[in-house]
Image (tube, grey):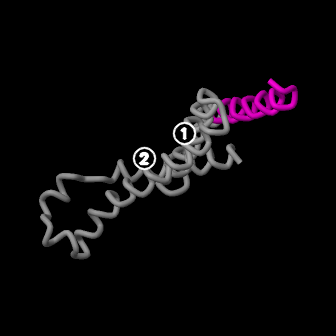
Amino acid sequence: MAWIYLGIAALFEAAWTFSLKYLDFKQIKAMGLTNLFSSQGAMAIVPLLGYIIFGIGNIYFFAMALKLVPTAVAMAIWTALTLIFIKLIDIWILHERLSWAEIGFMLLITIGIIGLKVVRSEERRVGK
C-alpha cells in the first residue's frame, strides 16, 4: 500500500508543480476581490486552488507512505516518480520534445525505483 501512496503523492506533487507554474499573484492582486469571481477571475484563481488542493493531497499521501517505508527510500521514489510524471505531462499535454538522452535517464530512474522496491521486498522477506 505504501507504494500506491507514493505514486498518488507523486501525482499530486506533479499537479502541484504545474499549478505553481501557472500561478500568477500579480494577476490575482490586480483583479481585486470584486473581479475575482468573474470568468476572467476564475481563470486566475484556478491555479491557486490547484496549488492548495494538490499540495494538501501530496502531503497527506506522502505522510501515509512515510509511516510504512523508510524515509530515504520514500523520498527517493517520490522524487523520481514526480520527475517522471512531470516529464510525461510535458510531453503529452504541453507537447514538448523528448530526446534519447532523456529516455535513457528516465529508464535509469525507473530501474532505480524497481531496485529500491526489490531491495525493500527482500529485506522484509529476510526479516530485517
Q: Quadrant of the C terminus?
A: top right
In terms of depth relative to the viewer, which is nearer, 40 or 67? Answer: 67
Whether 106 is drawn above or below 11: the answer is: above
Whether 126 is drawn above or below 46: the answer is: above
User: Dot 1 corresponds to which residue?
Assistant: 83
Q: Residue at x 19, y 57 (%)?
A: 27
Provide residue 74's location: percent of width, then percent of height: 61, 34
In terms of depth relative to the viewer, which is nearer, 109 or 119? Answer: 119
User: Dot 2 corresponds to which residue?
Assistant: 17
- Mark number, residue 91: none
How packed mark 1 is, by other alpha carbons closer than 10 Å (few <14, some 14-19, many 20 or more), is some
- Looking at the image, is mark 1 or mark 2 earlier in the sequence? 2
Q: Image check: 43 left or right of 98?
A: left
How packed mark 2 is, by other alpha carbons closer than 10 Å (few <14, some 14-19, many 20 or more), is some
In terms of depth relative to the viewer, which is nearer, 72 or 111? Answer: 72
Which residue appears farthest toward the bottom when viewing the image? Answer: 38
| Helix, strand or loop status at disc 2 | helix
Reply yes or no: does residue 107 show up in magenta: yes
Whether 124 is drawn above or below 54: the answer is: above
Q: Image check: 68 left or right of 102?
A: right
Reply yes or no: does residue 115 show up in magenta: yes
Q: Which residues lie in the magenta part?
A: 106-128
Residue type indicated by callout 2: Thr
Q: Residue at x 23, y 69 (%)?
A: 41
